C-alpha cells in the first residue's frame, strides 16, 4: 500500500489528515515534530511526505533540506503545509525542492487531489528515469561511464536524468521537475570554475540578462542558484537539440529554411539589442530547435551591456601568448567558447569572432551580425569559412575575405553571397545597421533561388 508520512505539531490537524487518507486506502505514518519526522522518513522511506512549515525542534525547511542531502530520501515527493498565505514561505519551500504546498485550512478533496497528483507525477518520472538508466547502462561500456556525472541524483527537487551536452565551461543535463511536472535542461558550471569570481560573475550575468529578456524565441530561464557545489541554470528543455547537432546529423540547410530560422533568431536578437545587450557568442551551438525546427537563442553567458566595457590594451606579444595557451583546448573542442581571464572583450568562439572582438575594441550590435553571418554561411555550406589552429582562424577573421558561397555552390544565387559578405565585412561600419535589416536583405535574396 502507498504510505504517507504526516509531520505536523498540531495533533488535530495531523489526525484529520491521517483519517482522510486512511479512509481512501493510504497507509499513514505520523510525527509530532521535525526531528521525529526526519527519523521516521529515514527509517520507513514513505511514498510521500506531508510536512508543516513552522514546527518546534526542526522546521519543515530543515526537514526538507536534510532529506535532500541523502540519496535514499531525496526523491520522495514532499508537500508543505502552511497556515500563512505568504508567497515568501511558499517560494522558499519550492526553491528548496518541495513538490507542492497546501494552505491551511484545506478541504479533504483538496488534500486528496494534491496527494494523488504528486504521486502520479512522481511515478511517471521514476518510470522514465528507470528506463533511461537501463538503456544507458546497456549501451555504455564500463570504461566510458562518467563517474563525475550528476545523472541519477536529485538537486533542489530536480531529478537529473542524463547528460546531454558538454562544453569548455559547463555540462548540460536533461532533468525533471516533479513540482510542476515538466522536463528542463540544467546547465552546471564545471567544478574547477565554481570558485573563480570571474566565471561566477559570467553565470550570474547570464541569469540576470535572460530573466530580463522576454521573447518567444529566447530560451526562458526558470531558476538559478550558486552553492558550495557549483553554479546552476535551469532552462526550458527543447527536444530538437541544437543547430550544431542538426548540421552534423543532416548537413547543410536549404536556403528558404535558413531564412525562417534567421528571421526567428534575428527577432530575438533585436529585442536584446533594443535594451542595449549584445550576445557576443552567436554560433550553431547556442541556437536550439524544437520538434518543428523553430529556433531559440540561448547562452547569454558572455552577453554585455553596450554601454559598458572599456577597450582592451593587450600587446600583440601578450595577445599571441594568450591564444597559444588556449590552442590545445581549441584543437579538441573548436566550437567551445574561448575565455581569457581579465580581458572580457576577447571572449567568444574563435570560429565566429568578429574582428573587433579580436582587436579588443568596443563592441556594437554589428558584432553579433558578423557572428550570425558566419553562422548562416555554415548553415548553407555545412562547414565554417575559416579553419586551422587558433591563430590562423583569428588572423583570417582579421584579414581574409569570406570564401564565395556562389563559387562553391553555383545553385546558390550571387545575391545570397552579397548579403553574407556585407554582414561579415571586416569594418563593422560597412555591415547592416541592425539585425532585422540583415534578415530582410537575406529574405529578398532568397527569392532569386529557382
Image (cartoon, rainbow, N blue to C red):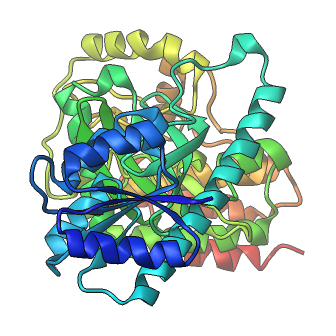
Percent position of residue 71, x then y: 46, 34
Percent position of residue 247, x then y: 75, 47
Q: How many labels sit on residues?
A: 0
Q: In this view, does 167 lie above or below 5?
A: above
The quadrant the C terminus occupies is bottom right
Of residues 223 and 362, the one drawn nearer to the viewer in this rendering: 223
Residue 121 in sight from this viewpoint? yes
In-image side of 412 versus 127 (left or right): right
Of residues 431 and 362, the one drawn nearer to the viewer in this rendering: 362
Of residues 165 and 16, the one drawn nearer to the viewer in this rendering: 16
Residue 215 in sight from this viewpoint? no
* Residue at (70, 58) in percent of width and height: 240
Percent position of residue 344, x then y: 24, 35
Q: In this view, does 333 lie above or below 293?
A: above
Of residues 96 and 184, the one drawn nearer to the viewer in this rendering: 96
* Residue at (47, 27) in percent of width and height: 168
Q: In this view, does 10 lie above or below 399?
A: below
The quadrant the N terminus occupies is bottom right
Residue 235 picture quarter: bottom left
Residue 420 picture quarter: bottom right
Q: Point out the residue furthest to the left here.
A: 56
In-image side of 434 versus 334 (left or right): left
Residue 190 picture quarter: top left
Q: Is residue 248 above or below residue 150?
A: below
* Residue at (58, 40) in percent of width and height: 401
Percent position of residue 366, x then y: 38, 58
Amino acid at each position: 500500500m502507498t504510505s504517507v508520512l504526516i509531520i505536523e505539531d498540531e495533533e488535530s490537524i495531523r489526525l484529520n489528515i491521517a483519517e482522510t487518507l486512511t479512509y481512501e486506502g493510504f497507509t499513514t505514518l505520523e510525527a509530532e515534530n521535525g526531528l521525529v519526522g526526519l527519523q521516521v522518513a529515514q527509517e520507513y522511506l514513505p511514498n510521500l511526505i506531508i510536512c508543516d512549515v513552522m514546527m518546534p525542534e526542526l522546521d519543515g525547511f530543515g526537514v526538507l533540506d536534510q532529506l535532500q542531502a541523502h540519496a535514499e530520501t531525496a526523491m520522495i515527493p514532499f508537500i508543505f503545509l502552511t497556515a500563512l498565505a505568504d508567497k515568501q514561505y511558499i517560494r522558499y519551500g519550492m526553491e528548496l525542492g518541495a513538490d507542492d504546498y497546501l494552505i491551511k485550512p484545506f478541504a479533504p478533496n483538496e488534500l486528496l487531489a494534491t496527494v494523488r497528483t504528486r504521486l502520479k507525477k512522481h511515478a511517471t518520472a521514476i518510470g522514465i528515469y528507470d528506463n533511461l538508466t537501463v538503456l544507458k547502462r546497456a549501451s555504455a561500456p564500463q570504461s566510458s561511464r562518467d563517474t563525475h556525472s550528476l545523472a541519477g541524483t536529485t538537486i533542489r527537487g530536480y531529478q537529473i536524468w542524463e547528460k546531454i551536452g558538454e562544453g569548455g565551461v559547463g555540462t548540460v543535463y536533461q532533468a525533471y521537475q516533479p513540482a510542476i511536472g515538466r522536463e528542463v535542461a540544467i546547465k552546471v558550471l564545471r567544478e574547477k570554475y565554481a570558485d573563480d569570481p570571474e566565471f561566477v560573475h559570467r553565470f550570474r550575468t547570464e541569469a540576470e540578462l535572460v530573466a530580463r529578456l522576454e521573447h518567444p524565441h529566447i530560451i526562458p530561464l526558470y531558476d538559478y542558484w550558486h552553492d558550495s557545489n557549483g553554479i546552476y541554470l535551469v532552462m526550458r528543455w527543447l527536444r530538437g537539440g541544437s543547430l550544431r547537432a542538426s548540421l552534423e546529423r543532416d548537413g547543410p540547410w536549404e536556403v528558404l529554411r535558413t531564412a525562417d530560422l534567421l528571421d526567428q533568431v534575428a527577432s530575438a536578437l533585436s529585442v536584446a539589442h533594443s535594451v542595449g545587450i549584445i550576445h557576443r557568442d552567436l554560433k550553431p551551438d547556442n541556437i536550439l530547435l524544437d520538434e518543428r525546427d523553430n529556433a531559440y537563442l540561448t547562452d547569454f553567458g558572455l552577453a554585455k551591456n553596450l554601454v559598458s566595457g572599456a577597450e582592451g590594451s593587450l600587446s600583440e606579444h601578450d595577445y599571441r601568448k594568450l591564444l597559444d595557451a588556449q590552442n590545445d583546448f581549441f584543437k579538441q573542442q573548436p566550437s567551445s567558447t574561448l575565455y581569457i581571464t581579465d580581458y572580457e572583450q576577447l571572449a567568444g568562439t574563435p570560429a565566429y569572432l568578429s574582428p573587433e572582438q579580436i582587436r579588443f575594441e568596443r563592441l556594437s550590435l554589428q558584432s553579433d551580425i558578423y557572428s550570425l553571418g558566419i553562422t548562416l554561411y555554415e548553415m548553407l555550406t555545412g562547414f565554417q569559412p575559416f579553419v586551422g589552429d587558433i591563430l590562423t582562424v583569428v588572423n583570417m577573421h582579421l584579414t581574409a575575405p569570406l570564401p564565395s558561397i556562389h563559387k562553391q555552390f553555383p545553385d546558390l544565387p550571387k545575391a545570397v553571397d552579397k548579403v553574407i559578405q556585407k554582414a561579415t565585412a571586416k569594418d563593422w561600419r560597412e555591415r547592416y545597421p541592425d539585425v532585422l535589416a540583415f534578415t530582410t536583405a537575406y529574405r529578398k535574396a532568397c527569392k532569386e533561388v529557382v
